[in-house]
Image (cartoon, rainbow, N blue to C red):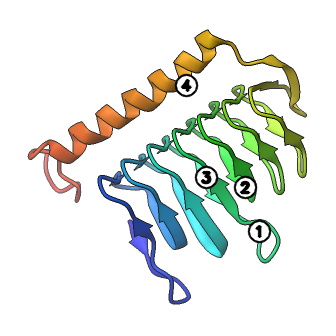
């Protein structure tokens, strides 16, 4: 569902899929061919949120920001895993934020990086491009390898294709009225 708040309505690029039960509100811009999945919340209520192209925000993820201090910026070709929390930070292009991971205010995750499932990137922490981040608090354990980069691409492509299938399926009921 899309909600206008404080005079600002979400702006969706061409081919964006917002699943039933997902919430997008306020000062939010989502780039073309991105997808917001079931139960995800994207709250641009106290600052702005900018999401690039071909980004997938998976089920139950929460994207938020901090008033006046920390907007949220997500680059192109990013996957935000199920139940992740991405709050008032910057995520570079071609990143994967794993299932249940947390990225907190003022943190910067450089392009082509992976935040491992369950990891917590602390407030204000800045990681260079190509970082594999693990732990709570997250630490850079090594450079992201080619196999992991191909996994980022695979995940992006899988969600892009799946969102296109939902958008093209004449039987998919966006209102949830039928079976």
Res. 159 image quadrant: top left
In the image, residue 6 lies at what x, y percent?
56, 88
| Residue that appears at 87% across and 31% down | 136
Instruction: Please say if the residues under marks 3 and 2 sit with CB atoms less than 8 Å apart.
Output: yes
Q: Which secondary structure lies at badge 3?
A: strand
Q: Of discs 3 and 1, which sits in the foreground?
A: 1
Res. 100 image quadrant: top right
- Label placed on residue 16: none
Q: Which secondary structure lies at badge 2?
A: strand
Total numbered badges shown on the rendered structure: 4
Whole-angstrom CA distance, mark 2 to mark 1, is 8 Å
Decide which of tag 3 and tag 2 comes sooner along the chain: 3
Instruction: Please say if the residues under marks 2 and 1 sit with CB atoms less than 8 Å apart.
Output: yes
Q: Of discs 4 and 1, which sits in the foreground?
A: 4
Whole-angstrom CA distance, mark 3 to mark 4, is 20 Å
Q: Residues within 10 Å of mark 3 (few under 14, many from 20)?
A: many
Decide which of tag 3 and tag 4 comes sooner along the chain: 3
Foreground residue among 21 and 55? 55
Instruction: Please say if the residues under marks 4 and 1 sit with CB atoms less than 8 Å apart.
Output: no
Q: Residue furthest bottom?
A: 7
Decide which of tag 2 and tag 1 comes sooner along the chain: 1
Q: Of discs 3 and 4, which sits in the foreground?
A: 4
Q: Is residue 115 left or right of residue 48?
A: right
- Label placed on residue 152: 4
Whole-angstrom CA distance, mark 3 to mark 2, is 8 Å
Residue beneath disc 1 = 66
In the image, residue 168 lies at what x, y percent?
16, 44
- Label placed on residue 62: 3
Whole-angstrom CA distance, mark 3 to mark 1, is 13 Å
């Amino acid at each position: 569902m899309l909600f206008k708040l404080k005079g600002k309505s979400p702006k969706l690029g061409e081919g964006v899929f917002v699943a039933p039960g997902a919430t997008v509100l306020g000062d939010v811009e989502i780039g073309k061919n991105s997808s917001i999945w079931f139960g995800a919340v994207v709250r641009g209520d106290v600052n702005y949120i900018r999401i690039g192209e071909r980004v997938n925000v998976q089920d139950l993820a929460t994207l938020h920001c901090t008033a006046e201090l920390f907007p949220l910026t997500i680059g192109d070709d990013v996957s935000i895993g199920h139940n992740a929390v991405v709050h008032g930070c910057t995520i570079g292009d071609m990143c994967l934020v794993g299932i249940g991971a947390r990225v907190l205010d003022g943190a910067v995750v450089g392009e082509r990086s992976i935040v491992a499932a369950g990891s917590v990137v602390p407030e204000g922490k800045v990681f260079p491009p190509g970082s594999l981040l693990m732990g709570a608090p997250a630490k850079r354990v090594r450079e992201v390898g080619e196999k992991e980069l191909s996994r980022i691409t695979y995940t992006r492509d899988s969600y892009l294709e799946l969102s296109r299938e939902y958008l093209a399926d004449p039987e998919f009921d966006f209102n949830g009225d039928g079976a």
